[in-house]
Amino acid sequence: AMLEAAQASVAEKQAAIEEVKQKAKSAIGSLRAEKQELEASVAQAKASAEAEQAELRGLVEAAQSGVAEKQAALEEAEATISTLRAEKEELEASVEQAKASAQGGEEELRAMLEAAQTSLSEARGEVEQKQAALEEAEATISSLRAEKE
């Protein structure tokens, strides 16, 4: 009877061990499935993060490219402004030079006009003297003709 009781106890213990083994196998299977699900989730998260990172890199590169283009355009505009300022200064200098030249030319023309007026006055004086001499000569001729007659 003791042997049967011991055998029954062993059978119970074996059944309990078998039940624990089955539960352990089931738990291991569940854990493996969860592990696979977690690994898939991690892989998906990594892929998603890499895609987002690549998109962000693209956005950063585009922004940097835009900044570089704007910087180049700004530098070109500044160079154009500098060129225009230099041209403006050159034009202003040319205008000042032209004004000075015109003023000098105006003074030269005034001097020439005064010289011409002086020459004209002198010529008028000479004409008046010659006119007087002519009138005197005509009077002399008339007087000589009168005497001759």
Image (cartoon, rainbow, N blue to C red):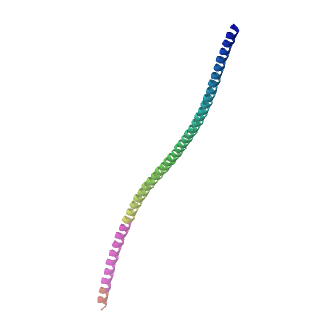
Q: Is residue 82 above or below residue 103?
A: above
**Quadrant in which the N terminus appears:** top right
Please state the total of marks drawn on the protein image.
0
Taking depth in this image into account, of 122 and 116 the one nearest to the observer is 116
Q: Is residue 119 magenta?
A: yes
- Camera-nearest residue between 42 and 83: 42
* Foreground of the two, 38 or 1: 1
Kindly indicate the quadrant of the structure image that contains residue 104: bottom left
Q: Quadrant of residue 53?
A: top right
Q: Which residue is nearer to you in this view: 136 or 52? A: 52
Identify the residue at the far front of this view.
1
Q: On screen, 28 above or below 95?
A: above
Side of 16 relative to 146 (left or right): right
Q: Is residue 18 above or below residue 78?
A: above
Which residue is pictured at 39% across the width and 60% down the height?
A: 107
What residue is shown at x 50% (from left), y 46% (from top)? 74
The span picked out in magenta is 115-141
Could you tell me residue 103's position as x and y percent? 39, 58
Q: As drawn, which residue projects farthest toward the top? A: 2
Magenta stretch holds residue 8:
no
Viewport quadrant of the C terminus? bottom left
Magenta highlight: main SS: helix
Q: Residue furthest bottom?
A: 149
Residue 144, horizontal then vertical, whole percent: 31, 87
Could you tell me which residue is drawn at 31 percent across and 89 percent down? Answer: 145
Residue in view at x 62 percent, y 31 percent: 36
- In-image side of 20 versus 111 (left or right): right
